[in-house]
């Protein structure tokens, strides 16, 4: 019986050792899984923080895009207003230039008329001198008064 008990005990010991080895393997697996779980948890937290940062950055970028769109719209409107002003100023300038040209023509006509009048006065003064020498003194006096102005 002792040999039978010994064999039974040896088999039980082998089973126990196999169970111990199996449990050690499970323990190693559990410890590895715990390390993996910690790593994945840390990675998940890190990715969550990055996601929050990116979400905040996205909000900032969307706000900047909206501001840019508003500025572009304002720029286009300002450009249109300035172009309208420029077109109006060009029109006024052309009208003023036409007025200046007409006035210059009038001045030239007036200068021509004045020149003709002076020639006529000189001609009449010469005629008066020739016709009446005593009237020549009056004509000379009139000539001084007229041309000195």
Image: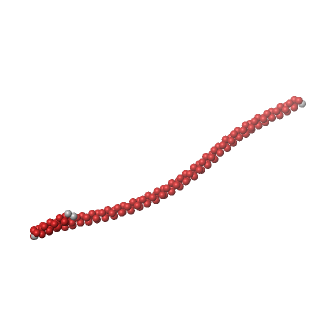
| Location of residue 55 in the rendering, given as x and y in whole percent from the top left corner | 59, 50
Q: Is residue 8 left or right of residue 68?
A: right
Question: Dividing the picture into quarters, in which one does residue 98 lie?
Answer: bottom left
32 w.r.t. 74: above or below: above
- Give the total number of marks visible in the rendering: 0
| Location of residue 24 in the rendering, given as x and y in whole percent from the top left corner | 75, 36
The answer to which of 136 and 120 lies nearer the viewer is: 136
Can residue 127 be spotted in the picture? no
Residue at the top extreme, as displayed: 3
Q: Is residue 20 left or right of residue 35?
A: right
The answer to which of 102 and 21 lies nearer the viewer is: 102
Q: Quadrant of the C terminus?
A: bottom left
The answer to which of 42 and 131 lies nearer the viewer is: 131
Which residue: 52% across, 55% down? 67
Which residue: 61% across, 49% down? 52
Question: Dividing the picture into quarters, in which one does residue 141 lie?
Answer: bottom left
Q: Is residue 68 left or right of residue 86?
A: right
Q: How is the image coloured?
A: secondary structure
Q: Is residue 28 left or right of residue 77?
A: right
Which residue: 19% across, 67% down? 117
The answer to which of 16 and 28 lies nearer the viewer is: 28
Question: Dividing the picture into quarters, in which one does residue 108 lie?
Answer: bottom left
Can residue 88 be spotted in the picture? yes
Q: Quadrant of the N terminus?
A: top right
Residue at the right extreme, as displayed: 1
| Location of residue 38 in the rendering, given as x and y in whole percent from the top left corner | 68, 41
| Location of residue 146 in the rendering, given as x and y in whole percent from the top left corner | 19, 66
């Amino acid at each position: 019986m002792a040999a039978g008990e010994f064999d039974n005990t040896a088999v039980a010991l082998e089973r126990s050792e196999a169970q111990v080895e199996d449990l050690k393997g499970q323990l190693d697996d559990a410890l590895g899984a715990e390390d993996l779980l910690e790593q994945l948890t840390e990675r998940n937290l890190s990715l969550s923080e990055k996601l929050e940062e990116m979400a905040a950055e996205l909000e900032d970028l969307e706000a900047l895009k909206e501001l840019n769109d508003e500025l572009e719209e304002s720029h286009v409107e300002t450009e249109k207003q300035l172009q309208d002003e420029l077109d109006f100023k060009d029109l006024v300038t052309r009208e003023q230039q036409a007025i200046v040209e007409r006035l210059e023509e009038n001045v030239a006509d007036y200068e021509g008329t004045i020149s003709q009048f002076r020639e006529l006065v000189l001609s009449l003064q010469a005629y008066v001198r020739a016709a009446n020498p005593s009237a020549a003194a009056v004509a000379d006096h009139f000539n001084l008064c007229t041309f000195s102005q």
